Structures are given as structure tokens and as C-alpha cells.
Amino acid sequence: MAGGKQTARQKMINLMYLVFIAMLALNMSKEVLSAFGLLNERIEDSNIAATERNGAFMQGLAEKVDEQPAKYKPLMDQAEQIDKLSTEFNSYLESLKAEMVATVDDPKDYEVMDKTIHLDEKWFVGGKVTPEGQEFLDQIEKYRAGVISVLGDSNKDIQADITKKFSTNPVMTRDDIELPWIDYHYKGFPMVASLTKITQMQADVKTIESEVLSSMLAGKLKIEASLTNFEAIVVPDKTAFFNGEDFTGRIILGKKDKTLSADKVIINGKELDAASMQAGQTMLKFPAGSVGEQKIQGEFQFKEGDSIIKIPVTSSYAVVPKPNSATISADKMNVVYRGVSNPMTISFAGIPDNNVSASAAGLSKTSGVGKYMMNPGTGREVAINVTGTLPDGTKVSDRATFRIKDIPKPAGTIAGQVDNTALPKATVEIASVGAVLEDFDFELPIQVTSFKIKIPGQPSVSVNGTKLNDQAKNALRKAKRGDGIQIFDIKAQIQGNSSYKLKGVSPVFVELTN
């Protein structure tokens, strides 16, 4: 055959030989075709299981979003983008497979899928790639670039795997001939082989989706578990310490999570609004309450699956009087008055009123925080002893001594006028005689019981009560303009406390004006 000029018969024999060799090369054994078909079935079964796993992952992630949207919503957004890219590409590949098996009567009869004509005509013409073939390449590129874009700067190992598995770069053959990727993998191959390759590509898509989803969640959990998300929290054993005490408490590690938000927070019987939960913290603001130890009680509620997880909140704090006034005292003015109810405020700095007790002769507790009343008896001084109980049960005490003084001498009045005054005779005749405590801090109602009146040229007249009797009026009528009338020996007592003997009342002098 390699010799000189060949006859027409020899040429025909040679051509038939070449055709025979080509047919042997193209016609694969039935066993190999069946093996491809069985491999395709197993990959498809594996793809179904992978689809179910990925679907379960997405459902579980959606439940996490319902429970803690701030934490898992960004992760869910990424997962949905990956899922959409995977689903769209997988659907396209499935449509290619459906077109291929539609060319045979039985999609399970792999032994008849030895022809290459379907994809050869669909994707190749005249040594070039058809628009349908280019669409196949574009779909691969769209999926590969889309997933890498979603991953961003994370999961570099998965990105490298995606780039490798879905690369469409030209391929170098064993004979060092560079072929386009689509030619190398799909041109001239039996349909069952191409079908299996596309099914394997679907498996790669589902594997990549599973790896990406798992990696994103694992990364989220790793970040949360990192010690950089913990902060040291000092918890004192009590909210206030006294000078000379030892500080006692403990330090615990608390995890910071700016995305964590409870479904419900109840503090002291009141549910807090959503605005109270900010950056993983619950902001508290409510009236501090009365002076003393106050409690904070409540609970956090988190939805976890079908259950509500409750985390109790128990704490306390101390309310102390607001320092809105200075303590100023006149050392010589620690005085209480006999015969008067002296109001007093007694407290112990840093100790609530219910843990303070005070005692002294004549001292009694009244309504109000730290309010007492002192009614001193005999003697010149009274000592008030105060005892306070600290939160740890320790007793502290103090005392203060007050001088006891009598009520000062009242001044007599007539018609409300004190001491020397000038009045018409008619006014004096009907006016009341009284007594007042001038410049005294207590308003004491004083009742005059009797007095004497002296009119010039007339004998003194004794009067019971507060107004002139007939005898006094007759004497008054004899008085002349300019005469000085003296009201003296005024007897008076405190209304409601007749047992206390007031000092003598000062007399009143009246000059008649007519």
C-alpha cells in the first residue's frame, strides 16, 4: 500500500479498511456503555440525597433567622444567592439531559446511547462552537463567577476548587495538542458518556453548594466562639461598700454579640419595647424608687425551635438620697422647745430608712421617710441615739445632744396691736386682748384667760376672758383723750396644752385718740 501507483480496486480496499478501523474505534462495547449508564444512575441518586441535605440546611437556617434575625439574616442572604445560582445552573443542565434522552425510546437502555451525533450537531459546526455550545460555556462561567462573587474574600480553598472544577480553559492533550475545553470533553463522545459527565457536573454543583453553606455557618460559629468576642465583667457582691471594708466580688467572662436580640424581655413585671434592645444589649430605664435597696427581677425569652427558652434576671441596687443640699449646722443652735412638738428628720448616710432606728425621751416616729417628732420633758438637755443596720448586718450608731429651752415670754396685744399703741376709745371697748410669741419659729395658738385694766383716776378692774366686761367699759367711758390705759397681769395658756405654764405675758399700753 505504500508502493507506487495504486489501482482503483486497491484504493477501494484501502478506503474500506479505514472505514472498518473507524467503526471499531467508534463502536464501544455494550459493557462499557452499560457501565457509563449505571454510573450515571448512582450519581443521580447521590444528587437527590445532596439536594435533600441542602434543602434541610436552608430550612434550618430559615428557622434561625426567625429566632435571631439580626445574627442570621446576612448569612441567609448569602445562602439564598448561592442556592439560586446552583438551582438555575442545575435546571439548565437538567434540560440538556432531557433533550439527550429524548432521542432514544428507553432512557435506561444505555447500550443504544453510543452515538455522538446529538451534541456534535448541537454544539459544533464547521470546526466552530454553535450558539447553543457557547450558551453551555456561558452558563458555566455565570455559575462559577457568581459563586466566587458571593464568597468575596472568604473560603479561598472553596473558590480554588470551584475554579478547578468549572474551568473552561483550553486543555492540552497527551500529544501536546491544545484543544478547546468543550471539544476535549464533549466532541465525538458517545451520548451516554456526555450524559454522565453532565450528571457529574450537577453533583459538583451540589457538593459546592453544601461545602459553601457548611463553611459559612462554621465560620459564623467560629467567630462567635472566638475569645475576642468575650469581655470581662466585674460583679461586686453588693452595690455599695463602706470605707474600711474589703471589696468582694467576682469576674466572669461574658460573650459580646451585637446581633443577639431576645424575643421578649420582662423587667419588674413590665415588658420592654423593641427599642430597648440595641447592639446585643438591653437598655434599662425606670424610676429608681425610694431610698433603700431595690430589686431587679425579670426574664429574657428566646425562641428556640418550638420552645421558648427563659433566662431569669435577678439583681439589686441601692438608692441613696440625692445630694442636693449641703449639711450646714449652727453648733450653738441645737435646740428643742419644751411644750412644743419639734419636727425632726433623722437619717444615716447610705442606709435606707427601714434599717434606721432612733430613740430618746419624748421622741416618736411619724409618717414619712426619716420623720420624727420630739416633745421634750424636764431637764436641760436630751440625747438622741441613732442605730443603722448595714446590708451585711453590721450595726453602726451615732448620737446627738440638743438643749431644751422653754417657750419665750409672750407679748400682750389689743386689737392685734403689740406694746405701745394708739386707738380710739370705741375700738378699745370692743377689742380682744391676746398674746403672741414674737419671732418664734413655731405657730402656737395662745388663749388669754384673764387680764387687768387700769384707767387713769379709776381703780384697776379684773376681767375674765379676752374682752372688757361691763365694769371695765364703764371705767373706760370716763377716760379722756390722751389718757394712757394699761392692760397688765395677762394670764394665757397654749390651746390644747394647758398643762404647760407659759411665762408671764408682757403688758400693753394704749393711748386714747378721742
Image: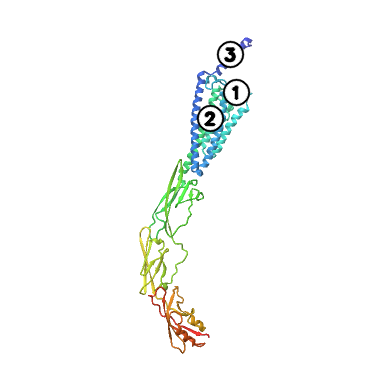
Colouring mode (rainbow / by chain / secondary structure / one colour):
rainbow
Does 147 sit left or right of 354 as displayed?
right
Q: Which mark is residue 133?
A: none
Does 162 sit left or right of 234 as displayed?
right
Q: Residue 85 location in percent, x, y?
A: 56, 34
- In this figure, which residue is indicated by the disc labeled 3? 17
Mark 1 or mark 2: name the one nearer the start of the chain: 1
Q: How far apart are marks 1 and 2 (CA)?
A: 21 Å
Q: Residue 498 location in percent, x, y?
A: 39, 75
Q: Are marks 1 and 2 in contact (CB under 8 Å)?
A: no
- Amino acid type assigned to the residue bearing label 1 in the image: Asp
Query: Which label lies toward us, 3 or 2?
Result: 2
Q: Do the residues labelled 1 and 3 touch (CB within 8 Å)?
A: no
Q: How far apart are marks 3 and 2 (CA)?
A: 41 Å
Secondary element under disc 2, as helix, strand or loop, is helix
Identify whether 202 is placed above or below 510.
above
Secondary element under disc 1, as helix, strand or loop, is helix
Identify whether 100 is placed above or below 422.
above
- Amino acid type assigned to the residue bearing label 3 in the image: Tyr
Query: Which label lies toward us, 1 or 2?
Result: 2
Does residue 176 appear in this view?
no
Identify whether 507 is placed above or below 238.
below
- In the image, 455 versus 378, the foreground residue is 455
Identify whether 175 is placed above or below 359.
above
Question: In which quarter of the view is residue 20 placed?
Answer: top right
- In this figure, which residue is indicated by the disc labeled 1? 120
- In this figure, which residue is indicated by the disc labeled 2? 202
Mark 3 or mark 2: name the one nearer the start of the chain: 3
| Quadrant the N terminus occupies | top right
Q: Which residue is drawn at 49% across and 23% down?
A: 38
Mark 1 or mark 3: name the one nearer the start of the chain: 3
- Label 1 environment density (alpha carbons within 10 Å; few <14, some 14–19, many ≥20): many
